[in-house]
Each structure stands twice: as structure tokens, then as C-alpha cells.
Image: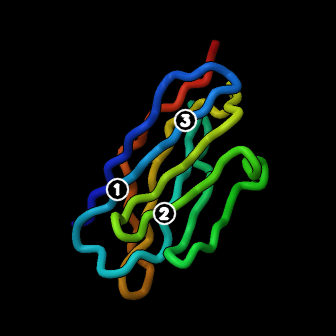
């Protein structure tokens, strides 16, 4: 069984920054990608960014330049640095892990709330 534990969500003012963390543990065997998705109220869950252990990244186009994903492979931990936050960034941010021998296994974190408001 795989567990993802997220942290770092908070209330922040527009223009502020936050750093989210997500640590993976359990029977992973092999990490294929770690990343973040977000879901605003009444909307679908959308890609924020993903990263492979070798450093290949995939960002939502609208977030490039403000958000940065990084991974500590030794700790099986993924980070999301979010700068210049806007009210429209308000959402529940979910950590995602694709893993396993064939990269077909998928795990989600419980989500961490990010609220951008003055």
C-alpha cells in the first residue's frame, strides 16, 4: 500500500508565496512521476505540474513561470513552490504518484487547501 502525505497549504494574500510538500511511502517499487493537481470548487481536477525522477517536467501552460516543481528522490518527496499567487489559484492541491513496474499504478494524496485572499 502506498501513502502520500501532503503539507503546506495555507491562507495567503495575493502576491504571496507558498511551498507544498508531499512525501510518498509504502510499496512503491519504482516512481515514474510525482506531481500536483488542483481542484477548485465546482471544477474538475486539473494538472499543475509533474516531474520524473530524472528531472523531466510537465507544467500547465498557465502556471509556467510562477510555479516550480522539484523532487527529492532520496526522500520520495515532491515539492511545489508557488509564487505571485492569485485568488484564482485557490483550490485543493492534490499530490499524485504514478509508480510500479509498468507505471500503471496511481495514488492520490488527501489534498491540502490553498486559499489566496486579502
How busy is the neighbourhood of tag 2: few (under 14 within 10 Å), some, or many (20 plus)?
many
Residue shown at the point (54%, 49%) measured from the top left: 80
Q: Residue furthest top?
A: 118
Q: Earlier in the sequence, mark 2 or mark 3?
A: 3
Residue shown at the point (69%, 59%) measured from the top left: 59
What is the x, y in percent for residue 9? 46, 33
Estimate the spatial distance between the alpha carbons at disc 2 and disc 3, rounded to whole Å. 16 Å
In this picture, residue 92 sits left or right of residue 100: right
Residue shown at the point (39%, 52%) measured from the top left: 22
- Write down the quadrant of residue 81 in the picture: top right
Give the label on residue 71, or none: 2
Q: Which residue is mark 3?
A: 18
Q: For the residue labelled by badge 3, is the local secondary structure a helix, a strand or a loop?
A: strand
Q: Which residue is mark 1?
A: 23
Q: Can residue 6 be seen by looking at this rendering? A: yes
Q: Are marks 2 and 3 in contact (CB under 8 Å)?
A: no
Amino acid at each position: 500500500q502506498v501513502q502520500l502525505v501532503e503539507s503546506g497549504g495555507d491562507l495567503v494574500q495575493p502576491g504571496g508565496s507558498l511551498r507544498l510538500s508531499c512525501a510518498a511511502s509504502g510499496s512503491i517499487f519504482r516512481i515514474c512521476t510525482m506531481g500536483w493537481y488542483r481542484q477548485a470548487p465546482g471544477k474538475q481536477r486539473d494538472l499543475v505540474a509533474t516531474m520524473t525522477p530524472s528531472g523531466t517536467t510537465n507544467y500547465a501552460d498557465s502556471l509556467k513561470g510562477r510555479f516550480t516543481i522539484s523532487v527529492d528522490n532520496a526522500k520520495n518527496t515532491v515539492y511545489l513552490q508557488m509564487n505571485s499567487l492569485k485568488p484564482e489559484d485557490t483550490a485543493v492541491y492534490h499530490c499524485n504518484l504514478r509508480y510500479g513496474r509498468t507505471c500503471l499504478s496511481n495514488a492520490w494524496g488527501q489534498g491540502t487547501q490553498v486559499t489566496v485572499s486579502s
